[in-house]
Amino acid sequence: MIFKLTSKGNNLTEIASRLYVDKIPTPSEYKNGIEDCKCIWTNLAIYSILYDEQYIGTYTAGKTSRSYVGSKNCKKIDKSKWIIIPNHHPAIIDESLFKTAQENISYKPEPINKRENGTSQRYGNIERPLKGKVVCGYCNHKMRLSSTRNAVFTCMYTMAAPDTPCHKFKIGNNELSDVIYGLVCNHIDSLLQADNASNYTGNETETVDLITENKRKVREMFEQFTRNEINEDEFASVKRQLNEELKRLNQFNSTINSETGKLVSIQVIMNELKKYAKQLKQEGTLSKSIIDLLVEKINVYPGNRITVEWIYSEPKSVDLSTAMIA
Ligand SMILES: [Zn+2]
C-alpha cells in the first residue's frame, strides 16, 4: 500500500495520515505484537520501507555490527560490505513499482529543508534557549520549534492523527519563555536559600585516625605473637575482630568521601547560580547556558499547563514546578 500510494504521487505526510486512518500498525508495533496500536507512522519509518530491498526479493544482511554479543550499540556498515542476494525470495512488490515509488518520494531531512526555504538563515542566529527541552505532555514526544520570527513549538508526532488530543498542538516560544523565566527565577531563589553545606567537616579525619590506630593494633598483636607472648589462636581471633572493624571504617570513610564530593559539586553549582541569578535579573531574559544548567525537561499540556523538571532541586521538595499561561 505504501508503494502504491507513493507511486500515485502522495507525499510522506499524506501516506502517514492514510496509514493512521486505515489503522495499519507501525513496523515496531507489528514486531512487538502490540494489540492496542496507535498506528502513528513517522516519515522516517515510511521512508525506510520504501528503500527496503527485501520487498523486491533481495536478501540483505550484515547492515550493522555489534561490538560484542548482546551489546546494544549497533554500528552501521558501509553498503559495499553488505551481504546482498538478489532474487533470494519471491518479491512482494514489483520492481518497477519499487523504483517509481522511490523516484516519486523526495525525502529531505529536516535541516536541509529549513536551509532551503531560507527561514533559518534569516532567524537562525537568534538564541532559542528552550529548543530541545519542550515535550508534549500528552504523547511524551519532543515538540519541534519552528525557525520563524514568531517561533512556535508544535507536536509533530500526532500530525497524521487528527483524533488525538495533541493533534496540531502548538505553543508560542515567546509566551512559554516568559513563564519559564519566572519559574527559573523562583527556582534559583529557593536553591540559594536551601544552603546546607556544613554538616560533614571533621568526620573524615576522625575515621582516618581510627583506621591508622586499627592498623597499629594489628601490627602490635603480630609482634606479640612473634615474641610468643600470645598463641596462634589468640592472635587469629583478635586479628579477625580488628579486620572487621577496619572493613567497617573503610566503608564509612568512602561514604563520607563521596558525600563530600557531592557537597563540593553543589558548592560549585551554587556559585554558578549566584552569578546567573544576577545576570538573569539584569537581562530579564533566559540564556541557553542557564536553561542547560537547570532544566531537564519542560512538559506542556493542552490547556497551556506547564510543568518543569529540574536537574537540581532543593532537598525534601518536589522536583516539579507548575504554571499556566493565561
Ligand atoms: Zn503530542
Image (tube, helix red, strand yellow):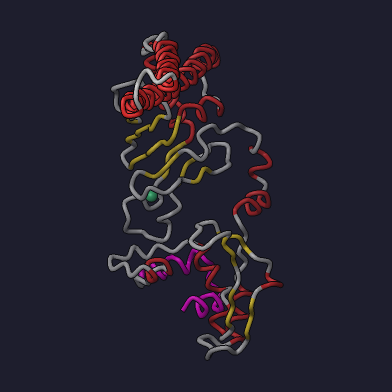
x and y, in percent, of residue 306 in the image: 35, 34
Residue 54 image-quadrant placement: bottom right
Query: Residue drawn at (34%, 37%), measured in percent from left and top?
Result: 304
Task: Please identify the residue farthest to the right as the structure is shown.
Answer: 80
Please tell me which residue is depicted at 62% across the width and 66% down the height of the picture: 106
Image position of 62 with respect to 243: above or below: below
Residue at x-position 32% and y-position 35%: 305
In the depicted structure, whether residue 142 falls above or below residue 282:
below
Q: Quadrant of the C terminus?
A: top left
Q: Is residue 256 at all visible to an observer of this figure?
A: no
| Residue 114 image point, x, y percent | 63, 49
Residue 116 counted in the magenta span: no
- Classify 299 as above or below 45: above
Q: Is residue 10 magenta?
A: yes
Majority secondary structure in the magenta region: helix
Residue 67 location, x and y as percent?
A: 58, 59
Q: Name the spot of residue 325 as percent of width and height, x first.
A: 35, 30
Question: Residue 181 occupies which quadrant of the picture?
Answer: top left
Tell me the residue at 57%/82% (across/down): 59
Please state the total of marks drawn on the protein image.
0
Q: Nearer the viewer, residue 263 or 161?
A: 263
Q: Is residue 68 left or right of residue 256?
A: right
- State which region is magenta: 1-21
Closest to the observer: 61 or 274? 61
241 lies above or below 115: above
Q: Is residue 1 visible?
A: yes
